[in-house]
Image (cartoon, grey):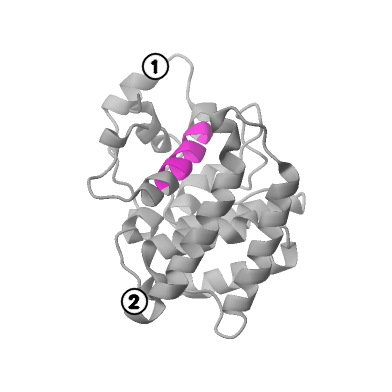
Amino acid sequence: MTNDKMPVGLSAFQKKIIFLIFSSFSVIALAEQPVTKPIESVAESCDLSFPGAELNSRHFQDIKAADSFKKQAKILIAMSEHEQAVRNHFTKGQPIDWKEVEETDRKNTRDFKKMIEKEGLFSVSQIGGQGVAAEFSLIQRSRDFAFQRNALDMMRRLFARQDFPGDYLAILEDQLLAKDGKPQIYGTRVKPDGSLYPVIDKDQLDARRASRGLAPLRQAICPMSKAE
């Protein structure tokens, strides 16, 4: 996705988060797309608004951190950007050092757990949209599954107060179900060949996605189909 396709005024960090989310959804949609209909025609007729969009992380992205939580937001963003940088060596033609990746993830989890051990996860109203995006990235990359499950419970409570993005909740829940060998709920995970991992009650999938701020599978292809 080129920068001129992004909303005006977004930081590089916000653009990276949006690109990663759009990319994952687009791969899912491609698996569902009839081969007889060109991607371009879908993009031209696509309405980027969808039921539940107000629950999506994009809805929160411009919210700033509260003054009393700016330090925490800055720390989380720096941690997340570092773990992304460790993984992004391949974009520069360099091999990924998986030992460094593992060490970074484990250190981030230790440091992050210390930050939230008393008060729990930070909310959007505390650390803002970018801060929560960084927070979620650290949770998703953690190798401590018990911690991830505990974080999921805290995310649910914040989401119930409309203070945490629903798409992050759906992604982590599907991720943990996959690790347990269970069908996913929201269809956020795909196999290497682009097909969906098993999902419960596929006929109601789009309704469940809407409840967590996710676009319907077919519509989720729109942002990437417009990319150059």
* Spot occupied by residue 35 in the image (x, y as percentages of width and height): 48, 16
User: Camera-side residue: 206 or 146?
Assistant: 146
The residue pinned by badge 2 equals 66
* Spot occupied by residue 207 in the image (x, y as percentages of width and height): 46, 51
Q: What stretch is highlighted in magenta?
A: 18-28
At x 52%, y 29%, the residue is: 32
Q: Residue 205 carries which label?
A: none
Q: Which of marks 1 and 2 is in front?
A: 2
* Residue 185 on the magenta span: no
| Element assignment for label 1 | loop
* Quarter in which the N terminus is drawn: top left
Principal SS element in the magenta part? Answer: helix
* Residue type indicated by callout 1: Pro
At x 24%, y 50%, the residue is: 9
Where residue 91 sits, quadrant-wise, is top right
Q: In this view, does 172 lie above or below 224?
A: below
Of callouts 1 and 2, the N-terminal one: 1
The residue pinned by badge 1 equals 38
Where residue 190 sits, quadrant-wise, is top right
User: Camera-side residue: 223 or 213?
Assistant: 223
* Residue type indicated by callout 2: Ala
What's the CA distance linking mark 1 and mark 2? Answer: 45 Å
